[in-house]
């Protein structure tokens, strides 16, 4: 019996080693399984976001096609009304706004700019300063407006740049204007453009934020105008019945240019979605051979 004790001890050590090996193998297999699952989820997410991306692009392309539909009764209306359709298993939501409905930073006058800032809660003094600073940024001279800012004022504020004394090239450029903040920019961004060339927004296409910049406008009237014009069928011309602007004029369902902002959001059945926000000018042939020119393209984040 004494001879069996060393063998038993060796057998016990071997059993412990086997258990450690089994535990190590289990850890390794679990790690491999976790890596495989993670890679599968990443691949699935990439596939879903790619699919949603192309579905959203399809929404942009369909909007451009429908905006040129020769049948006015079928043509899409660019007043921000929603259009929704199924595509490749996704639901695509599209909104189109004619840029003539927005406030052009390059030509808007002081009353329009001040009304825009006051409509989002800026007091009169700050609204005057921002209006003058925008006009000082875009004009060709170095003369300071009464509440504006040229190079010396930017230097005094500790900024290493000054106004370009050129027209705004993009909407986001207005963030560099002295006195502008990011939070304020996000409030006015839906209302502004650099592509319309008109001093005041066309109420037939103006988003809510731009309508609120019309002197005398109230939130209730702005919402009423949007609801009434979006209820009007495609092909409507002339004055929209029952709508009157604060100054007494009617809202005419006509006019507008060939430049449009298009928001296209595609949502898959599993909830993954992506949105594009783009500005496109229709007409002629672009360098890519397409009958339109992309002026701005912003990708939304997938969720």
Image: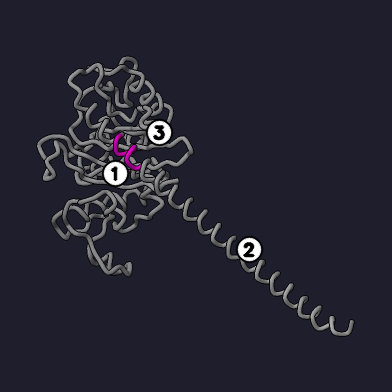
Q: Position of residue 113 (x, y in %)?
A: 29, 44
Instruction: Tell me how far mark 1 sits from mark 3, CA to CA.
Output: 40 Å
Magenta extent: 53-58
Query: Is residue 108 rendered to the left or right of residue 291?
Result: right
Q: What residue do we see at 45% from left, 41% from top?
A: 272
Residue position marked by numbered label 2 in the rendering: 26
- For the point 22% across and 60% down, the residue is 163
Q: Which of marks 2 and 1 precedes in the sequence?
A: 2
Nearest to the observer: residue 107 or residue 69: 69
In the rendered view of the protein, which quadrant contains the N terminus? bottom right
Residue 113 is tagged as 1
Give the image location of residue 49, x and y in percent.
Answer: 39, 45
Q: Where does the C terminus fall, quadrant-wise?
A: top left
Q: Secondary structure at mark 2?
A: helix
State whether residue 215 appears in this view.
no
Q: How many numbered callouts?
A: 3
């Amino acid at each position: 019996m004494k001879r069996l004790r060393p063998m038993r001890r060796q057998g016990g050590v071997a059993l412990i080693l086997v258990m450690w090996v089994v535990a190590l193998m289990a850890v390794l297999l679990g790690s491999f399984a976790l890596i495989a699952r993670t890679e599968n989820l990443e691949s699935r997410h990439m596939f879903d976001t790619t699919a949603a991306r192309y579905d959203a692009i399809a929404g942009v392309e369909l909007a451009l096609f429908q905006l040129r539909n020769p049948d006015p009764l079928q043509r899409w209306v660019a007043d921000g009304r929603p259009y929704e359709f199924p595509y490749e298993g996704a639901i695509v939501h599209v909104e189109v706004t004619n840029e003539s409905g927005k406030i052009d930073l390059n030509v808007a006058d002081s009353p329009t700019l001040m009304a825009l800032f006051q409509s989002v809660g800026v007091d009169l003094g700050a609204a005057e300063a921002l209006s003058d600073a925008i006009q000082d940024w875009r004009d060709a001279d170095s003369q300071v407006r009464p509440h504006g800012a040229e190079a010396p004022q930017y230097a005094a504020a500790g900024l290493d740049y000054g106004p370009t004394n050129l027209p705004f090239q993009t909407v986001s450029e207005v963030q560099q204007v002295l006195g502008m903040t990011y939070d304020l920019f996000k409030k006015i961004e839906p209302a502004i453009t650099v592509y319309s060339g008109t001093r005041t927004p066309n109420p037939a296409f103006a988003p809510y934020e731009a309508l609120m910049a019309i002197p005398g406008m109230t939130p209730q009237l702005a919402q009423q105008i949007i609801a009434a014009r979006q209820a009007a069928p495609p092909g409507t011309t002339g004055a929209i019945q029952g709508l009157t602007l604060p100054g007494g004029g009617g809202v005419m369902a006509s006019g507008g240019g060939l430049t449009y902002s298009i928001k296209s959001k595609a949502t898959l059945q599993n909830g993954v979605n992506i949105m594009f926000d783009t500005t496109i000018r229709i007409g002629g042939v672009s360098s890519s051979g397409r009958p339109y020119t992309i002026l701005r393209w912003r990708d939304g984040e997938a969720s």
